[in-house]
Image (cartoon, helix red, strand yellow):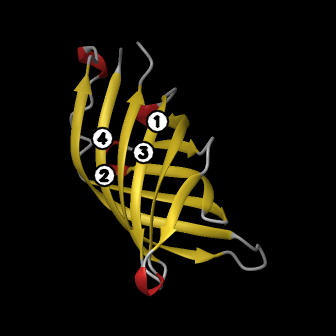
Amino acid sequence: MNILTVLVHFEGEGAPVPDAKGFVRSKATGTILDVKNEGLSPEAKIEHVLGQASFDTMVFAQDGQFWEAGRVDFPGIHSHLIVETRHPGRSIDLAGGAAAGSISWTIIGGGGRFEGASGIVTGNFTARSDGRFFDHHLYKIQLPVK
């Protein structure tokens, strides 16, 4: 088993895509809070991923459900992940036009140190009516055995 666990706190903004009803482009930057190597062979360990991360995704929202796909970058190790939802995330409305929700993405690929990666990402968020959001992601990244 070659699993890397990464916890990230993101802050970002979503903006509707012009002339594409239901589509939102979501961009965020974040701080990597923790990294754990689980069963990684010594040559596969990633020690210096702490620092910043960012993502740029496209979201389709409809009736309290949403689907999302895009890229998550880890510039400190010159690496990225490609993610997509296979099942819709869900959100609920809160007071004042805010919302909260959760989603799971499947890791479908990557580059740099994450070449050949797979796995899952879970996230939960709160969003304000102005499009700003606060998001926590927990990555379980399965790295290929070398």
- Residue 56 place in picture, x, y as percent: 52, 60
Q: Which residue is mark 1?
A: 120
Q: Nearer the viewer, residue 35 or 112?
A: 35
Q: Gap in Å between the C-alphas at discs 1 and 3?
A: 7 Å
Label 4 vs label 1, nearer the camera: 1
Q: Which residue is mark 2?
A: 8
Of pointers 4 and 1, the one earlier in the residue sequence: 4
Q: Which residue is mark 3?
A: 122
Q: Quadrant of the C terminus?
A: top left
Label 2 vs label 3, nearer the camera: 3
Q: Gap in Å between the C-alphas at discs 4 and 2?
A: 7 Å
Contact flag, marks 1 and 3 (Cβ < 8 Å)? yes
What is the three-letter code of the residue carrying label 2? Val
Q: Which residue is mark 4?
A: 6
Q: Quadrant of the N terminus?
A: top left
Of pointers 2 and 3, the one earlier in the residue sequence: 2
Contact flag, marks 2 and 3 (Cβ < 8 Å)? no
The secondary structure type at the circle numbered 2 is: strand
Label 4 vs label 3, nearer the camera: 3
Identify the mark at residue 86; answer none if there is no mark. Answer: none
Query: Which image quadrant is residue 22 in?
Result: bottom right
Contact flag, marks 4 and 2 (Cβ < 8 Å)? yes
